[in-house]
Image (spheres, helix red, strand yellow):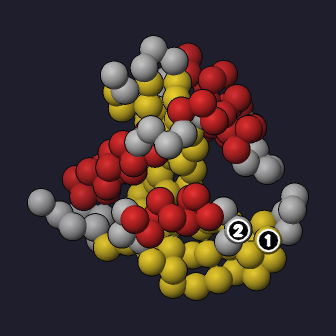
Amino acid sequence: MTEIRAAGSADIPEISEIERSCFSPAWSDKSLLDELASHDTFFAVASDGRILGFCVARIAGDEAELYQIAVSENARRRGTAALLMEAVFRWAAASGTEKLFLEVRAGNGPAVGLYEKTGFSVINIRKDYYSAPVEDALIMEKTIVRE
């Protein structure tokens, strides 16, 4: 059974491996550790004894940004990303956030589909935002419903 829990420093090697397989350029271990230490950051992992995926989001006032969400290749299409997204939404609502933003590569169809399915919509495009390879970024937004 997959559980969502707070990330810890012992998880960084597995998180870093997933990070490198999913993102170009990837965050360094130091950057991941810095996020882990930040008081305004939500950093969680999906685990079944091994790390299946992770997410990093940060709050700023009444808004938050989803910085990273990634799932290992062997854990995809099993609902892991949706579980992580739900955890982010609960955290954002509990934090008093009204809007959640993210940036995604325009050509990342699976990610865009997940975000649209979970209530995000495109509000802007940043031309040539990403490098390695150069690609546009879609800026997406979701209104957080507080319970």
| Helix, strand or loop status at disc 1 | strand
Residue drawn at the location 74% of the way across and 38% of the way down? 21
Nearest the eye: 60 or 119: 119
Q: Which residue is mark 2?
A: 107
Cβ–Cβ under 8 Å for marks 1 and 2:
yes
**Residue 104 visible at all:** yes
Q: Tell me how many marks there are.
A: 2
Residue at image coords 44%, 24%: 47
Quadrant where the image shows the C terminus: bottom left
Residue closer to the observer: 141 or 61? 141
Counting residues from the N terminus, which is met first, the one under dot 1 or under dot 2? Answer: 2
In the rendered structure, the answer to whether residue 105 lies left or right of residue 93 reads right
Along the line of sight, the residue nearer the viewer: 36 or 48: 48
Q: Is residue 5 among what the camera can see?
A: no
| 1 displayed left or right of 30 | left
The quadrant in which residue 111 appears is bottom right
